[in-house]
Image (cartoon, coloured by chain):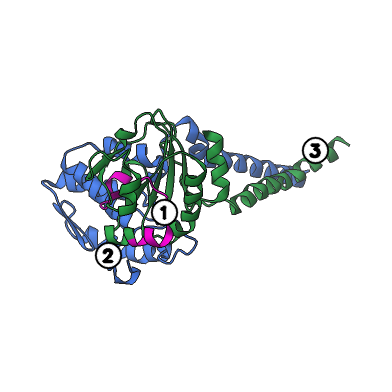
Chain colours: A green, B blue
Amino acid sequence: MQRNNLRFGIFSLPLIVFLLLGIVLWRGLYHDHRLIPSALLGQAAPIFNLPVLGVEEVRGKSEDLLESALRFSNQQLKGKAYLLNIWASWCEACTQEQAILLEIKRRYPIPIIGLNYKDEPESAREFLKQWGNPYKLIVMDQAGKAAIDWGVYGTPETFLVDQNGQIRYKYVGALTWKVIDELANIK
Amino acid sequence: MNWQTLNKAVPQCHCEKRVFERRSNLLKSKFYLASLTLFLALSISTTVLAIPQEIYHFDNPQQSQQFQSLLSQLRCLVCQNQDLKDSQAALAEDLRQEVYHQVKLGYPTPQIKTYLTQRYGNFILFNPPFLPQTYLLWLGPWFLLVFSIMLLSYIVFRHQRAQSL
């Protein structure tokens, strides 16, 4: 009797291993392995100082934040929570999230700062005219150097920075409606 | 801005349609072997490194060596199977520039690696550091190997014993 039990135990081991492996691989099917978790969560937001995109509509709306019309640094946002959205006119996924960004702008008082990544000002303006402008203001990172400080490896990416200047949340890819709920929970 | 008019490396979009994703593995094996032999055939301690469309000048061979060694240890985050040396992605180009800049300033390799892992996490290194979080990753295969040998020998000896009876 004991030998049979032992045999059963040994034979069921591969089955157990197979089931465990199956579960792990099944979950892996739904996980995008190309996504990299942010190394900056909980860290202080990197400081940038970049030229501002001169858009007539933007200028009108951002008067309370815009000191000089030339450059902007997120140090000027001390004490305020904000969303930093990395986008570009050549990015197709960014068109998908404009609607969601506009919705966030409508629902919440949080300022959305746009960081235009490796792009031309003219193309950026065209994009905003076509797809709408949810941004409080837009800074231009044409070389992509400031974005490296934020661990950006593609567009679009969105960061939530709280009033203490800490990065609380990062989303890679075009924003979805679910993300709005996640963001609301953090605040 | 029209995709087709760009003849340099294009930046990455987190889109469903990855139009510019390369079949990096196959390309890497033939191209990498060829470029590796070429690289070895040429003198190893050169002060100039040429990557298609980019030329990097160094003050001495040590820096050139450091640069090349660093590039092959760093993963391209866009084409994630390629290292920074091979990858044509725009981000790889930017990171190469940054690494080049730091090597020229004389920063040691660990410092440059820390700079990058602070921003991109440990994933950017092909060899993850040996920390409690990665013990399972590094030691797991060895444990599996030892366990398999033990199991195998148990089965074999049991069979032998049964035969000799």
In the depicted structure, whether residue A127 falls above or below residue B152: below
Extent of the magenta region: A126-147
Tag 3 residue: A6
Q: Are marks 1 and 3 on the same chain?
A: no
**Which subunit holds the residue at mark 3?**
A
Residue B159 in the image: x percent, y percent?
73, 46
Tag 1 residue: B80
Which picture quadrant has residue A113?
top left
Q: Secondary structure at mark 3?
A: helix
What is the distance, in whole Å, between disc 2 and disc 1 at their CAs? 19 Å
Residue positioned 38% across, 63% down in the render: B29
Query: Do residues under tags 2 and 1 come within 8 Å of each other at their CB atoms?
Result: no
- B50 relative to A41 in the view: left or right: left
Residue A162 in the image: x percent, y percent?
43, 32
In the depicted structure, whether residue B101 falls above or below residue A91: above
Residue A21 in the image: x percent, y percent?
65, 48
Residue sitting nearer the eye, B123 or B109? B123
Which picture quadrant has residue A7?
top right
Residue sitting nearer the eye, B120 or B107? B120
Residue sitting nearer the eye, B62 or A30? A30
Residue A22 visible in the displayed image: yes
Residue B139 in the image: x percent, y percent?
51, 37
In the depicted structure, whether residue B59 falls above or below residue A45: below
Q: Three-letter amino acid code at disc 3?
A: Leu
| Labels 2 and 1: the sequence-earlier one | 2
Residue positioned 54% across, 51% down in the render: A176
In this rendering, the label closer to the viewer, 3 or 2: 2
In this rendering, the label closer to the viewer, 2 or 1: 2
Residue B8 image label: 2
Residue positioned 30% across, 57% down in the render: A119
Callout 2 environment at 10 Å: few (<14), some (14 to 19), or many (20+)? few
Q: Secondary structure at mark 2?
A: loop
